[in-house]
C-alpha cells in the first residue's frame, strides 16, 4: 500500500481501508467476531484490535488539540515515551477488556469520522509540509494522520485476517 502524499490520497486511502476493515468484520458470523485468536499476540480478538485503533485516535486528538493550540502534548501519552509504547499498548489492551465489541466498534466509527473531518479541514500544504507545525517536529501533520488512519487500519486488517486464519487452523 503506497503511503499517501497528498490530501486526496489520504482521504481516499483512509476511507477505503476503514471500509475494508468494517466489511471484513461484517463478513464474520456474529459468533466468530468475539473468538480469541491463537495465543501469542496481545490483541487477541476483533474487539482488542478496534479498541487499540480507537484509543490511538484519542491520543492523536489530544496531540492535535494541544499542538494546534501552541502547546506540546505528551507523546505518545502522559507517563510514556515512544520507547515505552509496548507498555502503553498493554495498558490500552487492559483498559478495554470489559467493553464489548459493539461499543468499541461504535466508538471507533465515531472517532474515524472525527479524524476524517480533521483531514478534510486542512489543505495539502497544511497536511504534508514538513515542520509546518512545531508540535509535529521534523515531520508533517499528514504523516501523523496516515499513521492514525490508513496505515494503522492496514495493520488491523492484517492482524484480524491472521487471527481468523489461526482460528480456522484450530478448528
Image: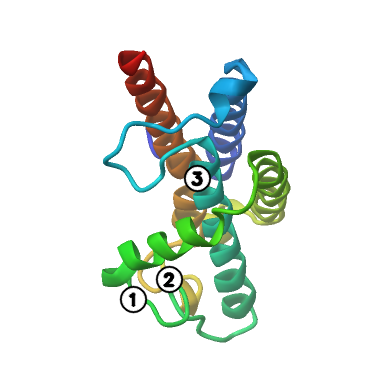
Label 2 and label 3: CA atoms lie apart by: 19 Å
What's the mark number on residue 76?
Answer: 2
Q: Secondary structure at mark 2?
A: loop
Question: Does residue 4 appear in this view?
Answer: no
The numbered mark, 2 or 3, whose residue comes first in the sequence reads 3
Depth check: 158 or 51 in front? 51
Q: Are marks 1 and 2 in contact (CB under 8 Å)?
A: yes
Q: Quadrant of residue 36?
A: top left
Q: Residues within 10 Å of mark 2 (few under 14, many from 20)?
A: some
Q: Disc 3 on helix, strand or loop?
A: helix
Nearest to N terminus: mark 1 or mark 3: 3
**Up-down relation of residue 9 to residue 135 (above or below):** above
Q: Residue at x 26, y 70 (%)?
A: 83
The quadrant of the rendering that contains the C terminus is top left
On the rendered structure, is 136 left or right of 102?
left
Question: Does residue 165 appear left or right of residue 152 in this picture?
Answer: left
Q: Circles 2 and 3: CB distance less than 8 Å?
A: no
Q: CA distance from mark 1 to mark 3?
A: 22 Å
- Give the labeled residue for mark 1: 81
Q: Which is in the foreground here, disc 2 or disc 3? A: 3
Helix, strand or loop for disc 1: loop
Percent x, y of residue 141: 51, 61
Q: In this figure, which residue is indicated by the disc labeled 3?
A: 48
Dot 3 alpha-carbon crowd within 10 angstroms: few under 14, some 14 to 19, many 20 or more:
many
Mark 1 or 3, which is nearer the eye? 3
Q: CA distance from mark 1 to mark 2?
A: 6 Å
Is 44 in front, or is 16? 44
Q: Circle 1: is it few (<14), some (14-19), or many (20+) Cα within 10 Å?
A: some
Residue 170's x, y, as percent?
32, 18
Earlier-in-chain disc, 1 versus 2: 2
Expressed as whole percent of the image width and height from the top left, the position of residue 32 reads 54, 22
Amino acid at each position: 500500500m503506497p503511503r499517501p502524499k497528498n490530501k486526496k490520497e489520504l482521504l481516499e486511502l483512509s476511507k477505503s481501508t476503514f471500509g475494508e476493515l468494517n466489511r471484513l468484520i461484517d463478513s464474520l458470523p456474529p459468533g466468530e467476531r468475539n473468538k480469541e485468536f491463537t495465543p501469542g499476540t496481545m490483541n487477541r480478538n476483533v474487539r482488542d484490535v478496534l479498541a487499540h485503533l480507537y484509543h490511538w485516535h484519542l491520543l492523536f486528538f489530544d496531540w492535535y488539540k494541544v499542538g494546534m493550540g501552541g502547546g506540546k502534548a505528551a507523546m505518545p501519552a502522559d507517563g510514556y515515551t515512544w520507547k515505552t509504547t509496548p507498555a502503553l499498548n498493554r495498558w490500552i489492551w487492559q483498559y478495554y477488556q470489559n467493553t464489548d465489541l459493539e461499543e468499541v466498534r461504535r466508538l471507533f466509527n465515531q472517532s474515524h469520522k472525527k479524524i476524517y473531518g480533521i483531514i478534510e479541514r486542512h489543505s495539502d500544504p497544511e497536511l504534508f509540509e514538513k515542520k509546518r507545525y512545531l508540535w509535529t517536529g521534523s515531520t508533517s501533520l499528514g504523516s501523523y494522520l496516515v499513521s492514525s488512519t490508513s496505515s494503522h487500519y492496514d495493520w488491523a486488517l492484517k492482524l484480524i485476517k491472521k487471527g481468523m486464519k489461526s482460528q480456522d487452523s484450530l478448528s
